[in-house]
Amino acid sequence: MSMTIKTEITTLSTLLEDYNYQYYVLDNPTVPDSEYDRVFQQLQKLENEHPQYISSNSPTQKVGGVALSKFDQVTHQQPMLSLDNTFTEQGLSDFIDRAIEKSATNDIAFCIEPKLDGLAVSIIYEDGIFIQAATRGDGQTGENVTENVRTIANIPLKLRGNNIPAYLEVRGEVFMPKAGFEKLNARLQAAQEKSFVNPRNAAAGSLRQLDSKIAASRPLSFYCYSVGVFSGDLANSQYQRMQQLKEWGLPVSSEVQRVIGVSACQKYYDDILQKRTQLPYEIDGVVYKVDDIAIQDKLGFVARAPRWATAYKFPAEEALTVIENVEFQVGRTGAITPVAKLAPVFVGGVTISNATLHNKDEIARLDIHIGDHVVVRRAGDVIPQVARVILEKRQVENCKPIKFPSHCPVCESALERIEGEATIRCTGGLYCAAQRKQAIKHFASRKALNVDGLGSKVVDLLVDHNMVKNPAQLFSLSEQQIASLPRMGDISAKKLINSLQVSKKTTLSRFLYSLGIREVGEATANNLANHYKTITAIQEASIEDLQRVSDVGDIVAKHIYYFFRQEHNIEVIEQLLTQGIHWPEIATVEESELSLLGQTFVITGSFNKLSRADIKSALQTLGAKVAGSVSKKTTTVIAGEAAGSKLTKAEELGIHIMDEAALLSLLNQ
Ligand code: IVH
């Protein structure tokens, strides 16, 4: 009897270890979360009933234990070093040249990996069992954070596979993924507790919790980046060692690569900088390590950093500057956005002098004053933001509070704030020149009617010269009128008239999107078009009926309904149709004609004949689902030019791949 329970506990533990390995290390879960939970609960129940069989490395033992009064010190057997930095391509190529020169070897290979923004941790496994974890500390001694690190979900308490060393120290970075950080801060704010400034601080704060139950509740994660002390033999290559760790069940970033040559090294940096904002965790550069361990040993160390490794850092995403003034911009739907005018500062690789302050509440939340010293943040293409005020630097005599206007700064109409919304809006509608400009720009934009040559500056001119009051009037402009505008000539006027003509042939979905109905983006416009097939049907739909369309909830339905009941909008739509805007009829598709029903497509790369939106809507019309990322569930990947990681992943998974030509012939069938 007791033997069977013991066996059952082992079987369930092994099953959970396999699930964890597939999920965290292979990034390829084989069972749904509910199945994992079911097995977990089954194991937990058995262990509760038979506590004598609970092993300290059971998958259930990741919830934290009794709180400590302080952390013990741990002396590292091998010092934990830091890295030299460079910020330039030149710095990288100097590092590579030095490594080649000092090692007297040409063509050295490098193992390259993202520089994770967290904290270094050393973990010791004895006979494959998790024994101890310590922070880096001063490099010689760190703190014993075993109980906290034990709770980190992707760190195995038991290694798997063959030839596991009797003693193995792995080193790596503990970090907090971006999504987990946002959730944690939301939770702390809701509980009126102090939130964290960034994921790195959140990771550090969580790892230093004396109560491991709190650490267990924090979404920490870990990637290995090197091997410390070990017994037995390991491969003589940094890259192969990382692959070996992975086989033993340890998490290693999927971005690790082995390359040769300066240009390949630089390309990796450029590529990952591009990908930076899409990665689920924060990175602040790339680490280059000589791959060959024998060459590493030959190169040795200077001071506290190895000569065989360097960090090529990304431009900082945060910088300190001063708010010189605040202006208020009016958006397409009348939303008033406060914009901070900054003393110019270099951040995220560019010089910025504006940052959005979002809305009135945000100004209050950050307690921003004109004259304040602030930290601004610019990540990738994201609009620069003010992250926080440095209150210590505030000089009361040089500071003044920000006064939110009571009337529209452009048309002087009253402002209103709808209950429950953070946004304050101008009530002027298309009477307001600012809203008119934005509405026309949106109408002409690429995903809407796509009017070539009608850029922001031209629209500003047309509105400022009172030539167009609404999108429909664009189509009655004459060549002479356009040519009379400053910096426009006969040729550009002719071109614009021609593109306006071309843009009249569109799709119902684009037309709907172009109207700029609140909350109706490309996807919703597409769903509406597929559902109703005609503009009249949409115009006549009731609020209840609109909610039957996928993605349309109560609020969006009301926006749509009221939009089509405004006299002015009805008129503009009528004028547009009279001007000859048209689209092909949407055929009513019988269920039997949904030839792609049950299939999931992913679109990647760029296309010549079709836009991504058009491809998406065509596939959806045939019943297919269109997903954002490649997984085992993907049926087909549509790959255009310069397709990147999604295509690679599809190839790895053996998923059917189609180019633009093949897609066109599929759609023609
Ligand atoms: S290697 C001798 N690899 O950066 C090798 N470090 O600035 C030393 N870090 O303390 C570390 N990602 O906390 C290495 N892929 C990576 C890393 C990485 C982040 C951190 C680590 C280290 C610091 C040095």
Image (cartoon, grey):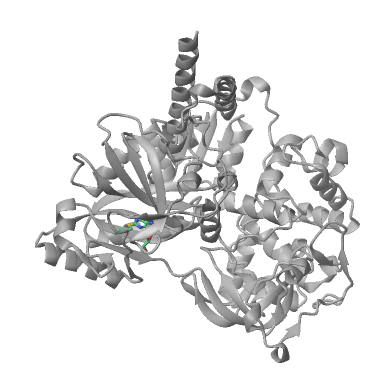
In the rendering, at what x and y percent does residue 43 appear? 54, 22
Q: Residue at x 57, y 29 (%)?
A: 33
Residue 135 higher or lower than 341, as above or below:
above
Q: Residue at x 59, y 19 (%)?
A: 49
Tell me if 415 is positioned left or right of 217 in this view.
right
In the rendering, at what x and y percent does residue 466 appear? 78, 76
Tell me if 257 is positioned left or right of 487 in this view.
left
Q: Quadrant of residue 399?
A: bottom right
Residue 621 appears anywhere in the view: yes
Nearer to me, 530 or 486 = 530
Q: Residue at x 61, y 62 (%)?
A: 498
Q: Residue at x 52, y 25 (%)?
A: 31
* Ligand 1 quadrant assignment: bottom left
Tell me if 543 is positioned left or right of 202 in this view.
right
View extreme (left): residue: 104
In the rendering, at what x and y percent does residue 78 appear? 27, 55
Residue 44 higher or lower than 368, as above or below:
above
Residue 74 higher or lower than 622, as above or below:
below
Nearer to me, 327 or 452 = 327
View extreme (top): residue: 1
Residue 668 appears anywhere in the view: no
View extreme (front): residue: 69
In the rendering, at what x and y percent does residue 48 appear? 59, 23
Tell me if 86 is positioned left or right of 569 in this view.
left
Nearer to me, 404 or 159 = 159
Nearer to me, 304 or 468 = 304
